Image (cartoon, rainbow, N blue to C red):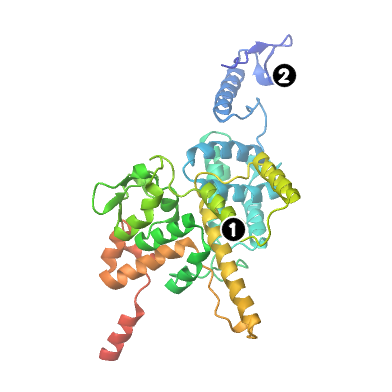
């Protein structure tokens, strides 16, 4: 346990402490209430810093925006340990804050500074809704600072006065609503995916799960004794509300998962990026037209050592970003092949039917729309695990064909 800095008296009558090789004077005289209160605050700061492995705030030291962000991100790394996507988004927001007000005292971070941070997000081309979410994360950082008495409460009150960006009132673009992806665009990409990514896509199509729930699947969370199987994720979006998520896995989903469940420890994620990378390397080796030369082998070994030193080897579990990236790259390969084939036969590449870019989130929307069309809104709500049908309305697109038939009959 580190030594606690002592409360010491200077020959001139004031109190001071020594920490990290630096001597700092405390306000007021030795043993005065003002001096003792400052020493108590310093010890509290020292304890918080030890917990988050950060240098403590010295008495009278002004905390800058950069220092506040560093403290918060260390705390968030533990608090959001099961949500790496949120940690990454916090880092994006923090980067914009540092670009504008790195050395600015946190107590002086006001509405005008927040608007300047928001302007950098607009200049970066971020969408209006995303910017509003990121500004909310900035406020969250300062709310944490107020909670830990690092920032005056008045700072947070000022930041709350900044209104969100309104539609049509800003240069920030608005994104199109997320639509269900058509089966044809998914089927065209499946042959280009690794077995791991292909299985995750198929499981999402059959269950409508969120990507995060698919990525974290383990054998220990799947009850294979029941029929159908029941998947109960330990970590999910509504866990903090005390809700339990159960996902039924029918025969088709079971057939997809069976090869991944075999000979795998129960606590290990079913879909491994490392296994996918090895499968892809083996496929490329089989497709080589010429054998690798000795010099090529040496360069490949050297590149592998460099990747290992930079910690660039794939891990044991996919992140949402890498999952989306694998699909996006497969779509690019499919479209590139279609254009090349069109040019080979003399067709205009512009007229070729290309695969539209889609993300794993659209698979959930497609599943919700299908269930709503066939079984109704309440069934879609149950299948998606929503507490309210209003949320299901966002995912399940209304069936326009029914409205058209009604209009033909009645109107």
Q: Where, by quadrant of the figure, is residue 326 drawn?
A: bottom right
Q: Is mark 1 on a helix, strand or loop?
A: helix
168 relative to 296 in the view: left or right: left
Could one spot residue 206 in this view of the protein? Answer: yes
The residue lying toward the viewer, choosing from 297 and 232, is 297
Circle nearer the N terminus (1, 2): 2
Task: Check whether the beta carbons of the residues at disc 1 and disc 2 lie within 8 A of each other.
Answer: no
| On screen, residue 16 above or below 354 | above
Q: Is residue 371 left or right of residue 349?
A: left
Residue plotted at (41% across, 51% down): 213
Q: How far apart are marks 1 and 2 (CA)?
A: 61 Å
Q: Farthest residue toward the right?
A: 295
The tag on residue 21 is: 2
User: Residue 375 location, x and y as percent?
Assistant: 26, 69
Instruction: Estimate the x, y position of residue 316 in percent, counting from the top left.
Output: 51, 44
Q: Residue furthest front?
A: 291
Nearest the camera: 182 or 270?
Answer: 270
Using the image, tell me which numbered label, if any, was put on residue 286.
1
Closer to the camera in the image, 289 or 17: 289
Q: Residue 65 carries which label?
A: none
Q: Where is residue 40 in the image (x, y as percent from the top left)?
A: 56, 21
Image depth: mark 1 or mark 2 in front: 1
Indicate the position of residue 54 as horizontal and vertical percent values: 61, 30
Quadrant of residue 29 in the image? top right
């Amino acid at each position: 346990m580190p030594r606690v800095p002592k409360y010491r008296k200077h020959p001139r009558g004031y109190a001071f402490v020594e920490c990290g090789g630096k001597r700092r004077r405390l306000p007021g005289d030795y043993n005065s209430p003002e001096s003792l209160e400052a020493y108590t605050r310093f010890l509290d700061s020292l304890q918080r810093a030890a917990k988050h492995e950060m240098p403590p705030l010295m008495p009278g030291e002004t905390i800058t925006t950069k220092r506040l962000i560093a403290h918060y991100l260390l705390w968030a790394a533990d608090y959001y340990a099961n949500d790496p996507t949120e940690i990454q988004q916090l880092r994006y927001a923090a980067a914009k804050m540092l670009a504008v007000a790195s050395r600015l005292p946190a107590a002086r971070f006001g509405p005008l500074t927040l608007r300047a941070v928001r302007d950098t997000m607009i200049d970066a081309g971020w969408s209006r809704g995303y910017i509003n979410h990121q500004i909310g994360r900035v406020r969250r950082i300062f709310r944490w600072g107020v909670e830990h008495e690092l920032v005056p409460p008045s700072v947070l009150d000022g930041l709350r006065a900044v209104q969100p960006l309104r539609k049509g009132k800003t240069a920030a673009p608005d994104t199109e609503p997320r639509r269900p992806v058509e089966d044809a665009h998914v089927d065209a990409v499946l042959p280009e995916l690794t077995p791991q990514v292909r299985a995750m896509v198929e499981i999402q199509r059959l269950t409508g799960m969120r990507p995060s729930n698919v990525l974290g699947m383990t054998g220990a969370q799947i009850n294979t004794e029941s029929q159908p199987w029941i998947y109960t994720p330990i970590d999910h979006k509504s866990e903090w509300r005390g809700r339990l998520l159960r996902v039924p896995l029918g025969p088709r989903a079971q057939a997809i998962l069976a090869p991944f469940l075999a000979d795998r420890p129960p606590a290990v994620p079913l879909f491994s990026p490392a296994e996918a990378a090895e499968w892809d390397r083996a496929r490329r080796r089989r497709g080589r037209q010429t054998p690798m030369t000795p010099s090529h082998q040496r360069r490949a070994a050297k590149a592998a050592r460099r990747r290992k030193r930079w910690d660039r080897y794939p891990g044991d579990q996919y992140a949402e970003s890498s999952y989306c990236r694998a699909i996006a790259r497969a779509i690019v390969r499919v479209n590139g092949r279609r254009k090349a084939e069109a040019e080979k036969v003399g067709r205009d590449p512009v007229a070729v039917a290309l695969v539209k870019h889609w993300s794993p989130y659209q698979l959930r929307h497609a599943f919700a729309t299908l269930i709503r069309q066939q079984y109704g809104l309440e069934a879609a709500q149950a299948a998606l695990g929503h507490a309210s049908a209003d949320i299901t309305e966002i995912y399940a697109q209304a069936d326009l064909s029914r409205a058209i038939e009604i209009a033909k009959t009645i109107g």
